[in-house]
Amino acid sequence: MRRLVLLGGGHAHVKVLADLALRPLAGWDVHLVSPYRRQIYSGMLPGWVAGHYPIESCAIAIERLAAKAGLRFHETAGVGIEPDRRVLACADGTRLSFDRLSVDTGPLPAIGDLPGSAVHALPIRPIEDFVAAWPGLVERIRSRCRRFDLVVLGAGAAGVELAFAIRQRALAEAWSHVFVTLAGTGELPLEGSPIGLRRRVAHLLAQRGIAWRGRHRACAIEAGRIVLEQGPPLAFDTCWVVTGAAAPDWARASGVATDAQGFIRVDRTLQSVSHPWILAAGDVAAYADPRTKSGVYAVRAGPVLAANLRALCEGRAPVEWTPQTRALYLLSTGNRYALAAWGRWFLEGDWIWRWKDRIDRRFVRQSTDAA
């Protein structure tokens, strides 16, 4: 019997698992390798921080999905691939041979160039580590009588949403001593987005009582302070690092073709350009048509990955996929209010938050029901 190994429980693999649960892959022994039994849907994480959802409502039961699909689940991380020998090395010492491998491990925090961040700050990824650290943060906040400074370092969409979310949580919990600061390298938040949207977000931050510190490029994090390239350090009691996505070291070290950042290069069928028996999707992949790292593209890649894995395992030709050039972004502002951005256009309102809420809940519910 031939073997298919799914490495990682990312959003694209959720669709693959659901597909396999409906239609088992005849003649193939399928394994799932993931360090976590559940997948926290990143789109709902700010809502959890804000207090709108319990964490269970944001989680997809990866282990249950695997069991329903008849897969063997390995609760461990992949740490290396020998692509020519077709072997996956795992953190628990397991070595899994494979005929085909699919990789959807998600990104690592981009903290390699930020000394001290892993020791003195809290990276948002892996999300499970962030969730595990939450009770300790709440205890620190509640036990403090004087001012408590929480800095969100990184002003992309995730950083902006999390700054709004923790401010909302502070208001809801009457943490009047908690002061939130969002820091980024641009003059305005959401660098690379249309100027109108960036100005609107900056206005909403001020309206919500969140301090904006633009043009702040961090070069190191020390105990209680962010060292900046220019100007005095930025003090904090807690710092969340939301500075983008990084590739796992093992991808480049394996000899599989990667881009300059170390993400696995794939063609339009999601097959590795150097080792076509390996597929990748989600943030760990460098698509043939480059796109920003976003959960939107990971979710959209899911059906294509599921179809192509099945086609290749059954000896059929895979289909090509070109990700859409523009994606709809729904940006929550913590207080059940949100912005919808499409290209240079954006709308806002509480109805957009309800729209986002329905989309997010439906994705998790459908994935959970499949289990």
Image (cartoon, grey):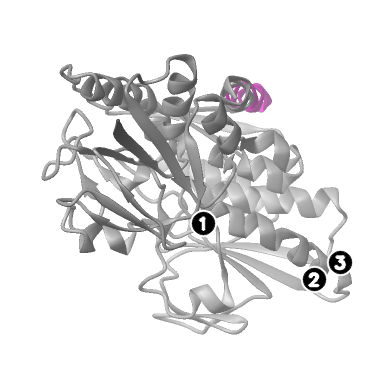
Identify the magenta region: 350-360
Q: What residue sits right under mark 1 in the picture?
A: 125
CA–CA distance between discs 2 and 3? 6 Å
The numbered dot on residue 140 is 2
Q: Mark 1: which amino acid?
A: Arg
Label 1, residues with CA under 10 Å away: few <14, some 14-19, many ≥20: many
Earlier-in-chain disc, 3 versus 1 = 1
Q: What residue sits right under mark 3 in the picture?
A: 142
Q: Mark 2: which amino acid?
A: Arg
Q: Quadrant of residue 182?
A: bottom right
Residue visible at 42% across and 68% down in the picture? 111
Q: Mark 3: which amino acid?
A: Arg
Earlier-in-chain disc, 2 versus 1 = 1
> In the image shown, does 205 or 34 lie closer to the viewer?
34
Residue 214, given in percent of the width and then of the height, sits at 47, 63
Q: Is residue 97 magenta?
A: no
Q: Which numbered disc, 2 or 1, marks the residue closer to the eye?
A: 1
Q: Quadrant of residue 251?
A: bottom left
Residue 217, given in percent of the width and then of the height, sits at 41, 71
Q: Secondary structure at mark 1?
A: loop
Q: Secondary structure at mark 3?
A: helix
> Is residue 257 left or right of 310 when viewed as pictured?
left
Residue 156, given in percent of the width and then of the height, sits at 45, 51
